[in-house]
Amino acid sequence: MGKKLFFLFCVALCLVFVSCESTEDGPVETVAAPVVEPVKPVVEAPKVEPKKEEPKPAVAEPVKAEPAKPAPVKEPEKTIIVPKEEPIVEPVKIVEDYKSVKHLTEEEKEYQRSVKDLAESISIDEFEADKKEVLAIIDDLTRIMKDRDYNSWVKYLSPASKKYWSNPQNLATVSNRLPVKGLKISSLKDYFTYVFVPARANSKVEEIRYVSSTVVKAVEPHAEEDLIYYMFEKTGGKWYLKLDTL
């Protein structure tokens, strides 16, 4: 607006100056002043920057959700109860009223030792009777061996033993096993003299051991192992010597 006023002022000043000169020289033709149209100020339109299109947010395509798999059903663990193995305890053989091995008398302990390998039942009264009879025979045999009384000895032999040791072949076989070389056993009497008697010298029999209800061993007891000196077999209610065989 200020520039426009300054411009109009300058134009008016020039017109005044020209008018003065024309008056001095003569009549001056009146010249119509040019009509100056007011200059419209150029107003620059503000530059409108194109709006930058903001990038549209990417729309994620919907993901097709797979149907959820059912969680595996965990079966409850089965508790397996293993039966506890109990140790196998063999029943202790009870004979008569002896139900405890504690606080036994010496006689009761001997009875237990005598019947421990026996499958049959022997009462303590039977045991005592058998032991008494067997030890009485051994006492008599001790006298017989001392006297070398062959005929009395033969009376105590069981029929099977008498027959076996009357066999010449068995006598010849035992002859080869004697510690004395060259000694011949040719009869049952020789067997008594050279085999039976020497084998039982200095023996001390005190107890019996049952093999069965009709067969017993007469032994000299020891903590480690019993020494067996006689075998007896009951026949017809009577005990007889049962000699070893080859």
Image (cartoon, grey):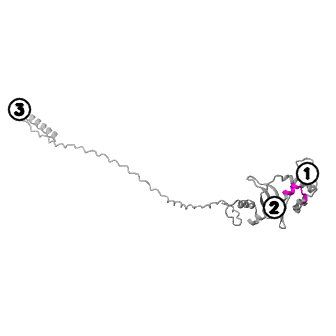
Instruction: Give the position of the C terminus as an image quadrant.
Output: bottom right
Q: CA distance from mark 2 to mark 1?
A: 31 Å
Residue at the spot 78% in from the left edge and 62% down from the top edge: 132
Of 140 and 213, which appears nearest the observer?
140
Location of mark 1 (residue): 175
Identify the secondary structure beneath mark 1: helix
What percent of the width, then of the height, locates residue 194? 89, 52
Residue at the spot 10% in from the left edge and 36% down from the top edge: 13
Identify the secondary structure beneath mark 3: helix
Location of mark 3 (residue): 24
* Magenta stretch encompasses residue 172: no
Task: Identify the amino acid type marked 1.
Answer: Ser
Pointer 3: residues within 10 angstroms few (<14), some, or many (20+)?
few
Discs 2, 1 touching: Cβ within 8 Å: no
Q: Which residues are magenta?
A: 142-151
Q: Main secondary structure of the magenta part?
A: helix
Q: As drawn, is 79 to the left or to the right of 25?
A: right
Q: CA distance from mark 3 to mark 2?
A: 206 Å
Of 31 and 200, which appears nearest the observer?
200
> Does any portion of residue 246 appear in the rendered image?
no
Q: CA distance from mark 3 to mark 1?
A: 204 Å
Residue at the spot 92% in from the left edge and 54% down from the top edge: 190
Task: Identify the amino acid type marked 3.
Answer: Glu
**Could you tell which of marks 3 and 2 lies nearer the N-terminus?**
3
What percent of the width, then of the height, locates residue 119? 76, 63
Q: As drawn, is 16 to the left or to the right of 237?
A: left
Looking at this view, name the residue that lies furthest to the top: 25
Of 10 and 47, which appears nearest the observer?
47
